[in-house]
């Protein structure tokens, strides 16, 4: 199974967008599943349903940090290089979807920041385009990993 397929399958199992992506990359990040799920649990729905940065993008950035992040703060070079990587990932997602902001991606849905998650029904999945965003985020990460 590809990372894209795993991520989309995770979403249809009921995980949020960030969890779906980060969990799919445990084989790359070295995270155990429980840690990945807990770490990414706050980022679903654009950060706790605030509809800010798309959770699949947040997970994309988490994977990049775990795989290519910096720890050396003696110079700004590693930070600069990593931030450029994150900006590139965001730009690739924006190129496909026009934005990385959840509420803008879900523009066809009524805005809802109620903390109660929507029930995962057949109708939920029919109207929600998140699986495409999740799959595309996984593909973008795979492209980055292949280049690295």
Image: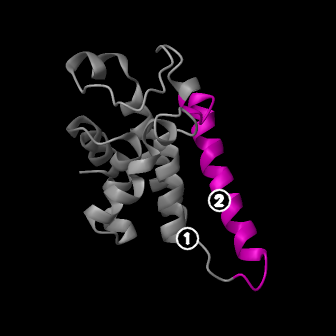
From this view, report whether residue 120 is shown above or below residue 23. Answer: above
Q: Residues within 10 Å of mark 2 (few under 14, many from 20)?
A: some
Res. 30 in view: yes
SS for dot 2: helix
Q: Which label is found at residue 68? A: 1
Q: Residue furthest bottom?
A: 74
Circles 1 and 2 in contact, beta carbons < 8 Å: yes
Q: Image quadrant of residue 129?
A: top left
Q: Which mark, residue 113?
A: none
Whether residue 25 is visible here, answered yes or no, is no
Does residue 92 appear left or right of residue 45 in this picture?
Answer: right
Residue at disc 1, secondary structure: helix
Q: Which residue is mark 2?
A: 85
For the magenta stretch, what is the residue range? Answer: 73-102
- Taking the image as shown, residue 102 lies to the left or right of residue 2, namely right
Vertical placement of 26 versus 52: above or below? below
* Closest to the observer, 57 or 139: 57
């Amino acid at each position: 199974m590809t990372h894209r397929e795993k991520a989309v399958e995770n979403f249809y199992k009921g995980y949020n967008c960030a969890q779906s992506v980060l969990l799919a990359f445990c084989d790359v990040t070295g995270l155990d599943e429980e840690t990945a799920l807990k770490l990414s649990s706050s980022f679903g729905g654009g950060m706790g349903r605030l509809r800010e940065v798309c959770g699949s993008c947040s997970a994309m950035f988490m994977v990049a940090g775990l795989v290519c992040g910096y720890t050396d703060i003696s110079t700004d070079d590693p930070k600069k290089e990593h931030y450029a990587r994150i900006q590139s990932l965001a730009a690739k997602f924006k190129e496909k979807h026009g934005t990385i902001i959840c509420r803008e991606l879900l523009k066809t849905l009524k805005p809802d920041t109620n903390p109660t998650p929507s029930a995962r029904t057949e109708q939920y999945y029919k109207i929600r385009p998140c699986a495409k965003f999740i799959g595309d985020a996984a593909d973008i990460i795979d492209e980055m990993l292949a280049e690295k």
